[in-house]
Image (tube, helix red, strand yellow):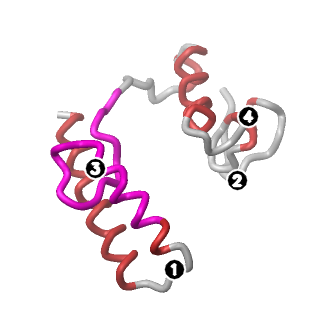
Amino acid sequence: MLSDTIRDLKRHTAKHILQSMHEEPESRREWILFQFRHAAQQHVRNKEYQIWAHENHAIEISPYIKNMSGSKIDYIHNNPVENGVVEHAEEYIYGSSRDYAGRKGLIKLVMW
């Protein structure tokens, strides 16, 4: 089931992120760990740190972009905007919105 896969992925990556934060040199370590601790205080299920959001809003995405509705593409492109990572979707260098805006992205996108 998709929710089980997402849960396991979050658990696995959170464990490794925290391990790296404690073992690898990172100039922002204390600030990042503070953010993780603060997020954990907002939920009773957490003991010390929260890295991932508890909610999953899985949306089925067609493997063929040409069959994907515009609203799904807009949803994906606007995630970095909604989360305050960038002001405009095409500014997110790891996404495909740059290509849709006529700019070259970091990842080669084949437009259908």
Gap between marks 4 and 1 measured at Cα: 28 Å
Q: Residues within 10 Å of mark 3 (few under 14, many from 20)?
A: some
Q: Residues within 10 Å of mark 1 (few under 14, many from 20)?
A: few
- The numbered mark at residue 26 is 1
Residue interval drawn in magenta: 32-57
Dot 1: element: loop
Q: Residues within 10 Å of mark 2 (few under 14, many from 20)?
A: few
Q: Residue furthest right?
A: 102
Image point (23%, 55%), residue name: 11
Q: Position of residue 38 (x, y in %)?
A: 36, 54
Gap between marks 3 and 4 measured at Cα: 31 Å
Q: Position of residue 82 (x, y in %)?
A: 57, 32
Q: Tell me the kind of residue under disc 2.
A: Leu
Disc 2: which residue: 106
In the rendered image, the vertical position of residue 79 relative to residue 105, given as above or below: above
Disc 3: which residue: 41
Gap between marks 4 and 2 measured at Cα: 16 Å
Q: Tell me the kind of residue under disc 1.
A: Glu
Q: Tell me the kind of residue under disc 3.
A: Gln
Question: Magenta-highlighted stretch: main secondary structure?
Answer: loop
Disc 4: which residue: 88
Image point (33%, 59%), residue name: 37
Q: Nearer the viewer, mark 3 or mark 4?
A: 3
Dot 3: element: loop
Q: Tell me the kind of residue under disc 4.
A: His
Image point (54%, 73%), residue name: 28
Q: Are marks 1 and 2 in contact (CB under 8 Å)?
A: no
Q: Is residue 70 left or right of residue 111?
A: left
Q: Position of residue 53 (x, y in %)?
A: 34, 42
